[in-house]
Image (cartoon, rainbow, N blue to C red):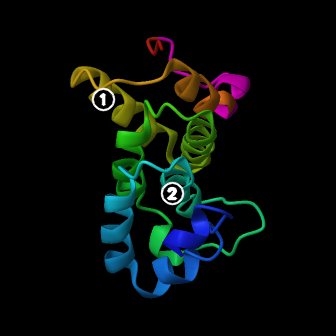
Amino acid sequence: MYEITKRNTAEYAIRPFLQTYHEDTLDILQQWIYDENSHIRRLVSEGTRPRLPWAKKIGALKGDFKNNLQLLEPLMNDPSKYVQKSVANHMNDITKEDKELVFQWLQQLRDKQHPINPWIIKHGLRTVIKSGTLPKNFSF
C-alpha cells in the first residue's frame, strides 16, 4: 500500500486495516506522518477521516477522536497544499461530531507554540464558522 500510494490514492484501501488491525495500523501511520512523499502524508490524514465521502465508516475511529488529532498534529503546518486540504477536511469532519474537542486541541497547540498553518484552521473550521457557533473568544 505504501508504494501504491506514491502513484495512486489508497485512503479507501487502508480503512479495512484500520478496522481489523487498528493499533498496528495506527503505529504504521505514525511513522508515515514524517514521510518525504506528500501522498503518503496525505494518506495518514485522508485514510483516517471519520466522514470520508463514499467510504465505509470505521467503528474503531468513531466517537473518540484523540487518535485522529494525534495523527493530524504533525501535519498542521505541512508544506504541501495537497496534505493541508486533507488535514482541514479531516478537522472539519471532527467538528461535526465534537467541535469542543477540536477547540481544546487547537488551544493546546497554541499553548505549546506548535506551528499551525492559518489556512488549515480556517478551512477546517468552515462549518463551525458558517453555522455561527465559533466561540467569540476564539481567534486564528
| Identity of the residue drawn at 62% across and 77% down | 13
**Label 2: element kind:** helix
* Residue in the foreground of this view, choosing between 136 and 60: 60
Amino acid type shown at disc 2: Ile
87, 39: nearer the viewer: 39
- Label 2 close to label 1 by CB (< 8 Å): no
Work out how far the residue at label 2 is from the one at label 1, CA to CA, in angstroms: 23 Å
- Residue range highlighted in magenta: 127-136
* Residue 3 image position (x, y, % from top left): 53, 71
The answer to which image quadrant residue 119 occupies is top right
Residue 120 location (% of width, % of height): 55, 29
Which x, y percent locates residue 71? 38, 52
Amino acid type, callout 1: Leu
- Residue on which disc 1 sits: 109
Mark 2 vs mark 1: in front = 2
The answer to which image quadrant residue 100 occupies is top left
- Residue 26 part of the magenta-drawn span: no
Going 78% across and 67% down the picture, which residue do you hit? 54
Using a 10 Å C-alpha cutoff, classify the residue at mark 2 as few (fewer than 14 neighbours), some (14 to 19) or many (20 or more): many
| Element type where label 1 sits in the image | helix
Q: Residue furthest right?
A: 54
Task: Report x, y in % for residue 132.
Answer: 67, 22
Q: Is residue 134 above or below residue 34?
A: above
Residue at figure coordinates x 61%, y 33% from the top left: 81
The tag earlier along the polypeptide, 2 or 1, is 2
Label placed on residue 29? none
- Is 132 in the magenta? yes
**Residue located farthest toward the bottom when viewing the structure as drawn:** 20
Q: Position of 68 compared to 108: left or right?
A: right
**In the rendered image, which residue does mark 2 sit on?**
40
